[in-house]
Amino acid sequence: GAVVSQHPSRVICKSGTSVKIECRSLDFQATTMFWYRQFPKQSLMLMATSNEGSKATYEQGVEKDKFLINHASLTLSTLTVTSAHPEDSSFYICSASIGGSEKLFFGSGTQLSVL
Amino acid sequence: AQTVTQSQPEMSVQEAETVTLSCTYDTSESDYYLFWYKQPPSRQMILVIRQEAYKQQNATENRFSVNFQKAAKSFSLKISDSQLGDAAMYFCARGGADGLTFGKGTHLIIQP
């Protein structure tokens, strides 16, 4: 099956710093990638949708200037949390689809802890 | 808003028994997909089963099957012969190429 690699799996940073999370499709071209956030014991909430070569589409309530998404190639999307604060601490998961299909493949997630 | 509702925060079942997890959803679309995902403590999202809304036949995957009632917008998951490895959070989701909307999840406990 298709593999999506997400790194890092865990990151701890100081308040005010920026953190970049990478999501790579290893054996397929991902025209669309999705970024989700999951707070402890809660569901996954869609943050944004990125299509290769175009600007990401953010869900209502998600600050585009804080969560920068870049999808420069068909195999890589990055999420940068800028000027991170403790309230940004969460589990972030990416997923990718092949050719815009309904079949989604998930990364293993990144636990972000902001001190 | 198009929502997905899982009314059972937690369910418990004896090993080898059968359990059903419920899910209802709201959508204005006629063509869509429904999913059940399993999230074990590792937090890796694992696809359990997938249903295409235009198909009337209920999807099955080994011990997992669904009861899809399109008019009622209901999509329950039945796990037969429950095993200890089935213990996890289960999320119902609706969507497709525009991403997924998840329910709040059901924590499934398997009693040995």
Image (cartoon, helix red, strand yellow):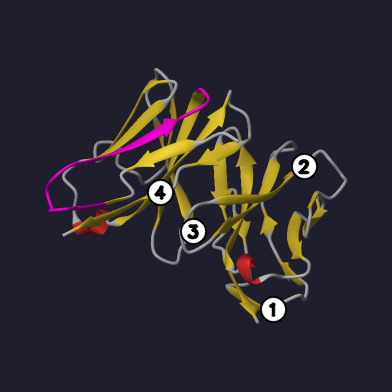
Marks 1, 4 in one chain: no
Q: Which mark is residue B53?
A: 2
Establish if B3 lies above or below B11.
Answer: above
Q: Mark 3 points at which residue?
A: A43
Q: Please identify, in this view, whether the residue under mark 4 or under mark 3 is nearer the observer.
A: 4
Q: Would you say B33 lies left or right of A12 here? A: right
Residue in the image at 80% along x and 49% along y: B59
Secondary structure state at the residue bearing disc 1? strand
| Residue type of the residue flagged with mark 2 | Ala
Marks 1, 2 in one chain: yes
The residues colored magenta run A11-29
Q: Which mark is residue A109?
A: 4
Establish if A5 lies above or below B18.
Answer: above
- Residue B63 found in image quarter: bottom right
| Residue type of the residue flagged with mark 4 | Gly
Examine the structure image and report whether residue A28 is included in the region drawn in magenta. yes
Examine the structure image and report whether residue A53 is included in the region drawn in magenta. no
